[in-house]
Image (cartoon, grey):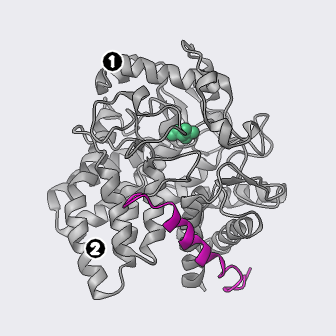
Amino acid sequence: MIFSQNEHAWLEDEARVILRQNDRGGYTVPNNSVYPYQWNWDSAFVAMGFALFDPARAWAELERLFEGQWPNGMVPSIVFHGHSDAYYPGPEVWQSGHMPPTTGISQPPVAASAAAFLLNTARSEADQALAGIKLKMLFPKLLASHRWWHEARDLQGSGLVAILHPWESGRDNSPDFDGPLARMEARVSIAHLRKDRTHVNAAERPTDEFYNKVMTLVEEAKALGWRDQEVFAASQFRVVDAGVQLILLKADRDLLALATHLGEHTAAAEIASWLARASAAVEKLRGADGIIRSFDARHGMAAHDITSASFLSLYAGVADANEAEMLARLYRTWKEALRFGVPSLEPSSSAWDKARYWRGPVWPVVNFMIAQGFAAYGFANIAEEIYHDTLGLIAQSGFREYFDPETGEGLGGRDFSWTAAMALVMRREISAGA
Ligand code: DGY
């Protein structure tokens, strides 16, 4: 399938304007109303967008994110630079004891992959020199953050890392977490404190029941002083999330390439051992159908549905040729039922809700990772179609947070930073592939 290279060229100027508008001084808010602070994986993707027109600003994005890094290596899900009344739960709720204030949980570790992207897209001599300097400073912090995942979130050295809160997956209310959340008890009632629904239609956001559960997890971990091992042992929620596990695997590969580039041989050996262990361990996440799914480690139960995270085995490089073929067939089956790919959930699922956050809608950053995976396994036509669908959605409905896969309607926040970043990155991928 050949798409015209120039079809969505006009999106690039608007994408750059949105990134500039959401810049708050070296860091970018995901959007001005719903998310008025710096989010972890948003910033990593945003850095990739900035890299294509302002490399210095791209490195600043990662540097400001790592200002929030904890002494134990964790990079929090949100760094609360500045103050806003528009978001709940804010810094006063988390009480992380860190400066700048942060949450007490993490998010999918995309930063090393972003740093590799920044290094690889540096073109001029000056940009390459800048990348060399910035990478050298960032590398020990990236290494510490990956070590935190592999040690603090994999206490037995199994190769599988656990998330202790659905927000750590970045796919907050995915049906992957319905079982684990149903098996835990809500001990707070906070619906009246929510602010998200003042900015976004309630039908597009998680339910009150979800919020009561996730805020219970926050309160319980806070009561334990956010001490890693104690929270890990006590948490009512402990899940091996397919998304985080596979994104970490890819990020480990990118971190290994960075270590090799820098001549960091001891670090490279450590990263290679994580990779070997995790590549073997993900096999345990495969169902009888060969598909990787999330796993409730606290109750020993695999998730039921197939979500878009299952496609990330291609991005992580742990699929064999048969699995790649199978995922290509699955992608096509999903696409037959919908106008736009890739939905966040299999369309035939009983949990399908085409407008509600991670229970159906299309998310541009996930599309980028899925397309990268298909391209790496030789399915250039699928990768191209996914880029084209994503740019088509943005062209139709604006730089929204997520999109209805049936109608293409824009959902969630507006003028979204990572959507703008992905428009720039996908445009570049299309030109490079042509
Ligand atoms: C939210 O507030 O919806 C975020 O996804 C949490 O990180």
Q: Would you say residue 413 is visible in this rendering?
A: yes
Please state the horizontal and vertical placement of residue 19, each as a whole percent of the image: 51, 66
Please state the horizontal and vertical placement of residue 128, each as a whole percent of the image: 28, 80
Q: Amino acid at mark 2?
A: Ala
Q: Quadrant of residue 235?
A: top left
Query: Does the numbered disc 1 mark a residue whose Cβ is under 8 Å from ligand 1?
Result: no
- Mark 1 and mark 2: span between their CA atoms? 40 Å
Q: Which mark is residue 179?
A: none
Please state the horizontal and vertical placement of residue 63, each as a whole percent of the image: 30, 58
Q: Is residue 429 above or below residue 358?
A: below
Q: Quadrant of ligand 1?
A: top right
Q: Nearer the viewer, residue 193 or 339?
A: 193
Numbered disc 1: secondary structure: loop
**Residue on which disc 2 sits:** 131
Q: Nearer the viewer, residue 344 or 8?
A: 8
Please state the horizontal and vertical placement of residue 327, each as a whole percent of the image: 65, 56
Is residue 9 a member of the stretch shown in magenta?
yes
Q: Mark 1 or mark 2: name the one nearer the start of the chain.
A: 2
Q: Quadrant of residue 97?
A: top left
Q: Which mark is residue 224?
A: 1
Callout 2: few (<14), some (14-19), or many (20+) C-alpha neighbours within 10 Å? many
Left or right: where does residue 338 sit relative to residue 180?
right
Is residue 124 a member of the stretch shown in magenta?
no
How many labels, in total?
Answer: 2
Q: Nearer the viewer, residue 346 or 10?
A: 10
Q: Amino acid at mark 1?
A: Leu
Left or right: where does residue 312 sit relative to residue 261?
right
The structure residue drawn at horizontal position 52% and vertical position 53%, both measured from the top left corner, is 30
The structure residue drawn at horizontal position 27% and vertical position 84%, both measured from the top left corner, is 126
Q: Which residues are magenta?
A: 1-27
Which quadrant is the C terminus positioned in? bottom right
